[in-house]
Amino acid sequence: MIYWELFLAFFIPNIIGYGGGPAIIPLIEAEVVGHYGWMSAHQFAETLALGNALPSPIATKMAGHVGYDVAGAGGAAVAVLATVAPSLLLMLGALGLLYRHRHSPRVQRMSQWVRPVIALMMAALALGFLLEGVRGAGAFHTGLIAAFSAIALLRFKTHPAFVIMAALIYGGLFIT
């Protein structure tokens, strides 16, 4: 039964999500944290942070980690399969159709309406992580990490993996 639940938890967000891995993270969080309760919001945020520091698509890393935590190696395999297979099948099916009609005003309008929705979902996810950070580490540490990260990313064009690594080291040394 747990394998079926893992499959659904990652299959559904990948079927209804549009825009790739980062766009479906809020949907995965709703399943993993909200619906099934396999992780707390804080654990999910940590998993996402670690996943962002590693190469490869974020959704598959999240699926592998959550699946392994819930049901071992078999759970990881089921969760990754549920993440990859639907997207691949839908992409192959829809690619020909979208390519054929790529200049259609309807297809272009659809893309224009989807972008703001994804932006709002990502903003809600970021706000949730910010609030969780303030609650867990405190406003001072969260603000310090956010300010350092913004400066490193925007001013010095530091690779995000190094920023995440620095935040992890800071958290390990100064946040109990």
Image: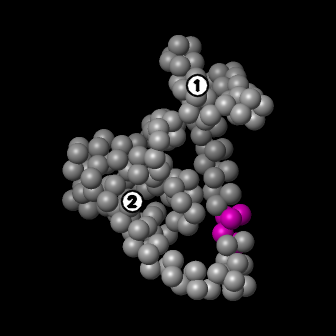
Give the residue type at disc 2. Thr
Residue ranking furthest to the right: 155
**The residue stretch that appears in magenta:** 113-117
- Horizontal relation, residue 83 to residue 156: left or right: left
Residue, x 57% and y 57% (percent of image)?
23
In this rendering, the count of numbered labels is: 2
Residue 38 in the image: state x and y as whole percent.
36, 46
Give the residue type at disc 1. Ala
Residue 28 in the image: state x and y as whole percent.
46, 55
Residue occupied by mark 2: 83
**Can I make out residue 139 in this image?**
no
Q: What mark, if any, has residue 159 been given in the picture?
A: none
Residue occupied by mark 1: 167
Residue, x 49% and y 69% (percent of image)?
16
Q: Residues within 10 Å of mark 2 (few under 14, many from 20)?
A: many
Residue, x 57% and y 63% (percent of image)?
19
Residue 146 in the image: state x and y as whole percent.
69, 30
For marks 2 and 1 on the same chain, the one whose residue lies earlier in the sequence: 2
**Can I make out residue 116 in this image?**
yes
User: Of helix, strand and loop, which one carries label 2?
Assistant: helix
Q: Quadrant of the N terminus?
A: bottom left
Above or below, 30 relative to 167: below
Report the predominant secondary structure element of the magenta stretch. Answer: helix
CA gap, disc 2 and disc 1: 28 Å
